[in-house]
Image (cartoon, helix red, strand yellow):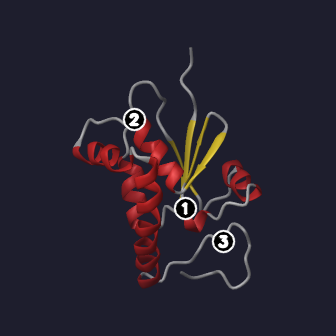
Amino acid sequence: MSKPEILLVYDKECPVCNTYCQNIRFRETVDDLKIIDAHKKSEALDEITKSGLDIDQGMVLKMKNQLYYGSDAIHSLALISGRSDLLNHINYWVFKSKSVSSWLYPVLRLFRNLLLKILRKTKINNLGKPGNKKF
C-alpha cells in the first residue's frame, strides 16, 4: 500500500513561513512532504487559484485530493507531524486543536504580513487583484 501524496504550497520568500515549512517532520505513515514555492508556476497553484484561495493570506496543504487553507492547513499539519524534536512537539500541542488553530492563525498571519511589509516583499497575488502588489 502506497503512502498518500502531500503537497504544501506557501510563500517561500517569507522567512517565518519558510523556516516553519522546512522544519516540519512527519510520522512514518506519510510520505515526505512535497514543498511548493507559491512564487513559481505549478499545477498546485493553478488549482488553488481556481478554488479562489488567496495564497498571500494562507498556506495550502493538499492531502487526499483535498485542499486545506490557512488555519485548517496548519491544524492538519500538526495532526500528521511527528513529535521527534522540540519544534514539531510544540507545533503539535499548539495546533492540534481546530479552535485554537482558527483563533491563533489569523494573529500569526497579521504579524507575518507586518514583517513582510517591513521587508518590502511583493505579494504573489495569485487571484490577480488590482492594486495588490505589496504587503
Q: Nearer the viewer, mark 1 or mark 3?
A: 1
For marks 3 and 2 on the same chain, the one whose residue lies earlier in the sequence: 2
Q: Circle 2: is it few (<14), some (14-19), or many (20+) Cα within 10 Å?
A: some
Residue beneath disc 1: 58
Residue 115 position, x and y percent, is 40, 77
Q: Earlier in the sequence, mark 2 or mark 1?
A: 2
Q: Is residue 29 above or below residue 126?
A: above
- What residue is rendered at 74% in x and 73% in y? 128
Locate residue 4: give its quadrant: top right
On the question of residue 14 being in view, the answer is no
Toward the left, the furthest residue is 86
Question: For the point 58% across and 74% down, which residue is it?
Answer: 123
Quarter of the image that includes the N terminus = top right
The amino acid sitting under disc 1 is Gly
Q: Position of residue 45 (x, y in %)?
A: 67, 55
Q: Secondary structure at mark 2?
A: loop
Q: What amino acid type is highlighted by mark number 2?
A: Phe
Q: Earlier in the sequence, mark 1 or mark 3?
A: 1
Give the label on residue 125, or none. Answer: 3
- Residue sitting nearer the eye, 65 or 34: 65
Structural crowding at the residue carrying mark 3, measured as other residues with C-alpha within 10 Å and reported as few (<14), some (14–19) or many (≥20): some
Instruction: Give coordinates of residue 100: x percent, y percent.
Output: 40, 54
In the rendering, at what x and y percent does residue 44 appear? 67, 49
Say left or right for 41 vs 89: right
- The residue that label 2 is drawn on is 26
The vertical placement of 26 against 131, above or below, is: above
**Of residues 126 and 83, the one drawn nearer to the viewer in this rendering:** 83
> What residue is shown at x 46% (from left), y 48% (from top)?
98
> Label 3 sits on what residue type?
Asn
Q: Quadrant of residue 107?
A: bottom left
Whether label 1 touches label 3, CB < 8 Å: no
